[in-house]
Image (cartoon, helix red, strand yellow):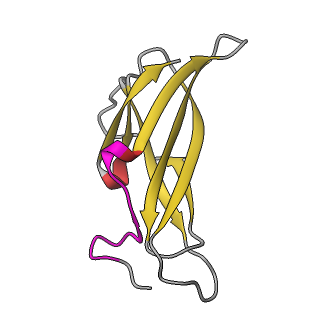
Amino acid sequence: MSKPENGFACEAQDGDFTATAYQNSKGERWVTVEGTCSCNTEGFELTLELAPPPLVPIPEEIHLNLVEHAPGGIVPPVVTPTPVKAEFLIDGKVERVLIRNRNITVPIKKE
């Protein structure tokens, strides 16, 4: 199945994601980012990866990219909800997640 005009096969919006901060037993602050996107076929795998830092640092944000891994072979063209979840080590200043390649901002909630 072809990709839409924006170049992505999976649709993602602000309301599709949550971000929750927690502290582990070592005192480190982590954020769990998770969501569900609508992919245009079955079999997609999604990952969240750290994006390169911006030219002008923004201490209140962690920058990520949503990466699509297309299925191999023939798959039915059925819109499929596809989950994604990842954890990242953050410092105490980070208040929001920016999924840069989708222009999605997610405020971080505390657990």
Q: Position of residue 37 (x, y in %)?
A: 44, 57
| Res 52 visible | no
82 w.r.t. 28: above or below: below
- State whether the magenta stretch is mostly helix, strand or loop: loop
Image-based side of 66 in relation to 4, left or right: right
Q: Could you say which is closer to the camera, residue 99 or residue 55?
A: 99
105 w.r.t. 93: above or below: below
Image-based side of 99 in relation to 68, left or right: left
Determine the image quadrant of residue 6. bottom left
Q: Could you say which is closer to the camera, residue 6 or residue 74?
A: 74
Tally of numbered tags = 0
Tell me what residue is drawn at x 64 percent, y 87 percent. Answer: 73
108 w.r.t. 23: above or below: below
| Res 71 visible | yes
Tell me what residue is drawn at x 32 percent, y 51 percent. Answer: 13
Q: Is residue 11 magenta?
A: yes
Q: Position of residue 3 (x, y in %)?
A: 38, 78
Tell me what residue is drawn at x 35 percent, y 23 percent. Answer: 60
Image-based side of 19 in relation to 106, left or right: right
The magenta segment is 4-15
Q: Is residue 41 magenta?
A: no
